Amino acid sequence: MSLCHYVTMSPLVQFLRHVSFPPDPYLLPTALKSCPALPLTRALHAAAVAAGVALDPFVSSSLLHTYLRFGATADARAVLDGMPQKTVVGWSALVAAHAACGDAEGAWRLLEEMRRGTAGGSGGVEPNAITWNGLVSGFNRSGCARDAVVALVRMHGEGVLRPDATGVSSALSAIGDLGTEAVAVGEQLHGYTVKSGCRLGFVVTALIDMYGKCGRADEIIRVFNESCHMDVATCNALITGLSRNAQVSEALSLFREFLAQGVELDVVSWTSIVACCVQNGKDLEAVELFREMQAQGIEPNSVTIPCVLPAFANVAALMHGRSAHCFALRKGFLHDVYVCSALVDMYAKCGRVRNAKRIFDAMPSRNVVSWNAMIGGYAMHGEAKNAVRLFDSMLMCKQKPNMVTFICVLQACSQAGLTEEGRRYFKEMQHEHGISPRIEHYACMVTLLGRAGKLDEAYDLITDMPFEPDGSIWGSLLGSCRVHGNVDLAEVAAEKLFHLEPDNAGNYVLLSNIYASKKMWGGVNRIREMMKDMGLKKEMGCSWIEIKNKVHMLLAGDDSHPMMTAITDKLKQLNIEMRRLGFAPSTYFVLHDVEEQEKDDILAVHSEKLAVALGLISTSPGTPLRVIKNLRICDDCHEAMKFISCFEGREISVRDTNRFHHFRDGKCSCGDYW
């Protein structure tokens, strides 16, 4: 559409004609400042040209800035080129605009043109502090972190300019995005802020954020302690920075201090501390903080919900997860792909894969995270055929799989013993989808082959890997050696693990269990002595069960639970009935060479049995029980759960580190292939 058309059609231009005097250099800048749209800006530009005032410094400057406000950099450049005298303000605005839209090449080119001047035009103009700060801030906003840091370094190197508070905070943000490679520049900028007294609240916040992203937890605390600012933004940056560096205890302590001191924390603060707990394995604390947040009158948002849902999933807090689902439904969050993906993951990990599928099917849009959550949910429940079918649907929907997708598919094949299918997907991942296998994919393949009894093939795969195998690879092989009783290969894998993970007690225990299954008590004693000399102890078994909207945590061999007497009585009753009906405990995989009765006593207090016993005495007959365990379920507990599900008429779901086991009528969903 031509400028003449805008001149004719614009209501503002019609008004200017009606009042019988042309637009002047005082009226047009005011009109441009309040201009609501780009077409009207162009109409006003045309009117200025028609009135002969377009080259007036005030009018041309207003036109340039108005065009930039609407992102019309080409129009703005045309205005600048037409100016008889190009000012540093006009050049700086145009340079900053190109930087802000991510056109780094264009921004640097304009900076050079600014200095040397344009052919046939006025002479060059030296950039000032506004120019450089605009470059740094623009690059930072558009994600060009490296260019932002380069601009800062060049600015400093010229020796005549100093960044202002806005430039400093933008530069610190960019340095944080680059991480440890740019931390030295961040330290110099920190020194500059101290010397110049540039310690405004948002600069302190930017310093804390930068050090957090660069892995400098000690500097986070030091900057905070030296600052006199304690606004909500600074507190949020501190919590987030500590979380990034796994300083969860310190973050929790400071968060409590902020509350006690009356700092008005907002939804971002609460979401940050919840996320901190979830990311660092403090799931119960995250659940309690989420409840406390609501009690304080802070309403969760669409970011809080996907942050807290993993905590509910990790401790099987299904009722809490359902409440969060209902809240998201009431607030209209279910259009958010991240909220829905987190709900899919939560329901699957809480043993409700059908609920997960309903959420997945109802999603208005899906991304690769959504597909991965559902495929991974099927894999976790041993539903390999559904996982493979969904993967095929994913490809039909033109959704490109990523490395996580293939981890989920390979895990599904491994859980169900689909060896040939797993081999095929491993090849397709590389040849059809261009995804190079990573350690996680090789670990899945080693598990797949090992569980199928193809231990030599699994070992050959390890030796042919293009990079050094890590603990997950050798751990997968060692676990398969336990299943098939291969002592020789187990010793090879264990020696590698002892070198890679000398402080991981689980590897020593697993080899000891393999020796014990073969009644090689000399090997068992040797491993026990090694662990004793190194001060290693077997990881404590821990299980969680949700009863009446409260999550209970039970530890193996721990009698601190207030209902432990009743739990113990229930277990004794079950043991009596189990023995009466011919059930014999499996004692092969107990670490110690002790009498059979003592072995029975050790097995009787495994955490999943304690959790199930608590569920049996605390819920109505027929109520399903869901238990989450931090370790792999042992053979004895697996057999015991099958018996209890039949004897008590209950469906019992146990999620261990590998998968879900759904026990019903004396059978397990895994078909004893686990």
Image (cartoon, grey):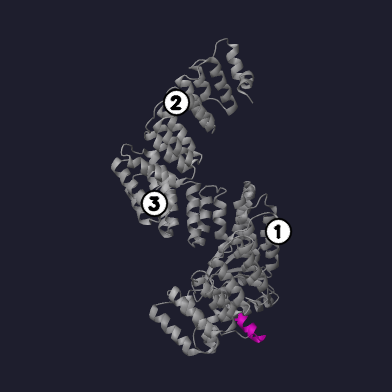
**Which corner quadrant of the image does residue 410 belong to?**
bottom right
Residue at (52, 15) in percent of width and height:
52
Quarter of the picture holding the C terminus = bottom right
Foreground residue among 124 and 638:
124
Q: Position of residue 396 (x, y in %)?
A: 71, 56
Q: Amino acid at mark 3?
A: Ala
| Residue 575 magenta-highlighted | yes
How crowded is the residue under tag 1: few (<14 C-alpha within 10 Å), some, or many (20+)? Answer: few
Q: Is residue 548 left or right of residue 219?
A: right
User: Which mark is on residue 182?
Assistant: 3
Residue 619 can be seen in this image: no
**Chief SS of the magenta region:** helix
How crowded is the residue under tag 2: few (<14 C-alpha within 10 Å), some, or many (20+)? Answer: few
Residue stretch in magenta? 572-583
Q: Position of residue 53 (x, y in %)?
A: 50, 17
Give SS at disc 2: loop
Quarter of the picture holding the N terminus = top right
Q: Nearer the viewer, mark 2 or mark 3?
A: 2
Q: Amino acid at mark 2?
A: Gly
User: Which mark is on residue 393?
Assistant: 1
Point out the tag, 2 or 1, that comes first from the N-terminus.
2
Residue at (44, 83) in percent of width and height:
528
Give SS at disc 1: helix
Looking at the image, do the residues carrying marks 1 and 3 touch, with CB atoms under 8 Å apart?
no
Foreground residue among 277 and 421:
421
Residue at (55, 86) in percent of width and height:
517
Distance from label 2 to label 3 (Cα)?
A: 41 Å
